Amino acid sequence: MPSVLSSLNSALHRAFAADERVLLLGEDVLDPYGGAFKVTNGLSAAFPGRVLTTPISEAGIVGVAVGMALRGLRPVVEIMFGDFVTLIADQLVNHASKFHWMYSGGKSASEEIHVPLIIRAPMGGRRGYGPTHSQTLEKLFLGVPGLRVLAPANLGDPGGLLYRAILETEAPVLFMENKLLYLLPVMDEAALADFSLTPCGEDVFHLALRDAPPSILTIAAYGYMADLARQAMLKLAYEHEIFTELIVPTQLSPFNLTLVTDSLQRTGRLLTIEEGTYTLGWGAEVVARAAETLGYRLKAARRLAARDLPIPASGPLETAVLPGVDEIVQTAKTMV
Amino acid sequence: MTDPSHLYRLLYLLRRFDETVLDNFPRGVFFGTTHTYLGQEANAVGVLSGIQPGDVVFSNHRCHGHFLTYADALGHNDAPHALFAELMGRATGVCGGRGGSQHLQWRNFYSNGVQGGIVPIATGMALAEKRKNSGAVAIVFLGDGTLGEGVIYEAFNLASLWGAPVLYVLENNRIAQTTPIELAVAGSIAGRFEAFGIPVDELDSSDALEIMRIASKAVDDVRSRQTPRALILHTCRFGPHSKGDDTRPPQAVMHLREVRDPLGIHAPRLAPEKRAAIELEVNRLIGAAFERALADPFPSLNQ
Ligand SMILES: Cc1ncc(C[n+]2csc(CCOP(=O)(O)OP(=O)(O)O)c2C)c(N)n1
Ligand SMILES: [Mg+2]
């Protein structure tokens, strides 16, 4: 099984081969270094002139990429650490994501303005990098009209998600890669052994234990947290006889609740899990929508997330701030 | 302050501290990553060893040397231990283990790991000191790669408009992570400051004494005129950017070590026995600080 890293890397190679309009901008992305996390490894050697190593100018290079996208190219920008997406917020929020809607009023389809731009960034902690290199900041960009936020998991085809985003998108996309996912193998049906995996549409997964009694709790988690949630499901089942199902979206914004509500029709209980901070996070939106949709049939809801603190460098502190498998198990137990 | 023995001791302390960090990273005793100051020690020693207690220093990701020199100048009696402990995530660390290698704060010393943002902040600190009539100046360190960040130019403009007593120290090691300066910096570095009416001094040297002479004049000038200045120090990075990520040819780095070693340049100013005694003392101190930090407790969130 390939790792998530190699799946993403080969997707970049395939996208470059498929469409000459694709190019990549980022810091330290040239070979032999191939990017801080090696996602662009081999790309500059294979496609000379189409991988642009840049100065340390996150706002500038995203702005330049927006311009390239407006004029017919399909740029991919790598932000070295996801923490630095704060530096590109103006380009994304006040420029790129507005252009399609704002400029397309009163136009025919052929005259509409499009911004096919992908911003990739590694997010997440558990590596001791400390407060400015460990955050999970996608929540800052959820709900921005015109901006899609994607987050691959180690399920299905994470590279395929990236490939389609690069070649098919007409709107700006933030593609958030959790660092700990990189080295995990992409789990297929065989590797998942105890679980049945149902891809629902292209970008949402449903996981449940095979041959288990009916589930009584729906867990919704994305990115690396989905893998921790899967581990917690096993513990809940084998150690506590609590049976759950897991919904793993790869598109966080705009968010499609259908699969979560389908599952909630069966379980009535919702636990959301994310690595970003607790307050006003992704889970808050999912729970609010589930409550709006299900009304009194939603019997219980909880959100598990990072504590509302910066991410400390010290390992034991970092572990205490970020949600882990044991906390998922403990929280689930309080809900049934 | 310009006592050659003292300078040698500081240079050697900075060197041995970061060598110890690199040597011990594979043991798994440190969290995260680190950026060592190997080769650039004369800059910190030259700029900061004459600092006054009220002065403010803002450093970047490559901050160990700046911190240790600042701490020495202000009489911290246990800085190497506190910095080892911070890198090891211990409760006794500079920030109790919360910050790690690139996020330090002690007295008027600060560092942060995001490129660029510290430059306007240091400018604001300088303006605050000016409003308080404290007579203090701010000194902020930035690398050549950080010239890519637009916010620094907003800071230069503000500093010049409002007369901020700040010294911008640009450590030009001609590389940013793996990117050589030729691929990242167009035009003139000095011209970037001059365009805002900020006077520039420039020096291509790894001699701590030479750097000290030019830096202390610059600091005096910032203090007396209450206006910004820039100091461009051309320098050499001997180690990897962080741990094992040096893409330069080893011979090129070897050559830099031969011709631009701040220790080698300063060493002849001391008698060999004196040097040996200093090295022995510092090695003991570093070894003991490391072991003590390793035995320190981890923090908890409630502390
Ligand atoms: C905003 C931002 N972008 C990228 C990085 C990652 N990064 C850390 S240090 C560095 C290179 C800095 O080069 P330079 O300013 O020349 O300082 P040097 O490392 O040479 O001391 C990069 C790209 C960062 N910390 N912050
Ligand atoms: Mg540099």
Image (cartoon, helix red, strand yellow):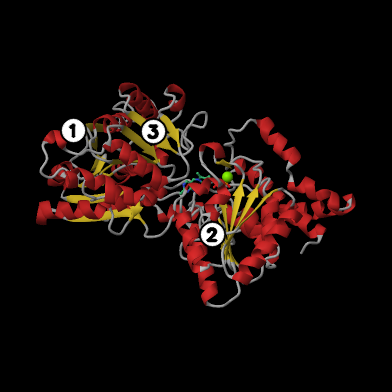
Q: Is A213 displayed left or right of A315 in the figure?
A: left
Q: Is A95 displayed left or right of A125 in the figure?
A: left
Label 1: chain?
A: A
Label 3: chain?
A: A
Helix, strand or loop under label 1: loop
Gap between marks 3 and 1 measured at Cα? 28 Å
Of marks 3 and 1, which one's residue comes earlier in the chain?
3
The percent coordinates of residue B235 (x first, y second) are 66, 46
On the same chain, marks 2 and 3? The answer is no
Q: Residues within 10 Å of mark 2 (few under 14, many from 20)?
A: some
User: Could you tell me if residue A329 is visible in this image?
Assistant: no
The mark found on residue A24 in the picture is: 3
Q: Residues within 10 Å of mark 1 (few under 14, many from 20)?
A: few
Give the residue type at disc 3: Leu
Gap between marks 2 and 1 measured at Cα? 60 Å
On the same chain, marks 3 and 1? The answer is yes
Give the foreground label among 2 and 1.
2
The percent coordinates of residue A117 (x first, y second) are 30, 38
Please state which of residues A113 and A155 is positioned toward the viewer in this rendering: A113
The residue drawn where x is 78% and y is 62% is B2
The residue drawn where x is 54% and y is 73% is B130
Is there CB contact under 8 Å for labels 3 and 1? no
Give the residue type at disc 1: Gly
Q: Which residue is mark 1?
A: A201
The mark found on residue B197 in the picture is: 2
Q: Residues within 10 Å of mark 3 (few under 14, many from 20)?
A: many
Quadrant of ligand 2 in image: top right
Query: In the rendered picture of this protein, how many numbered marks are placed on residues?
Result: 3
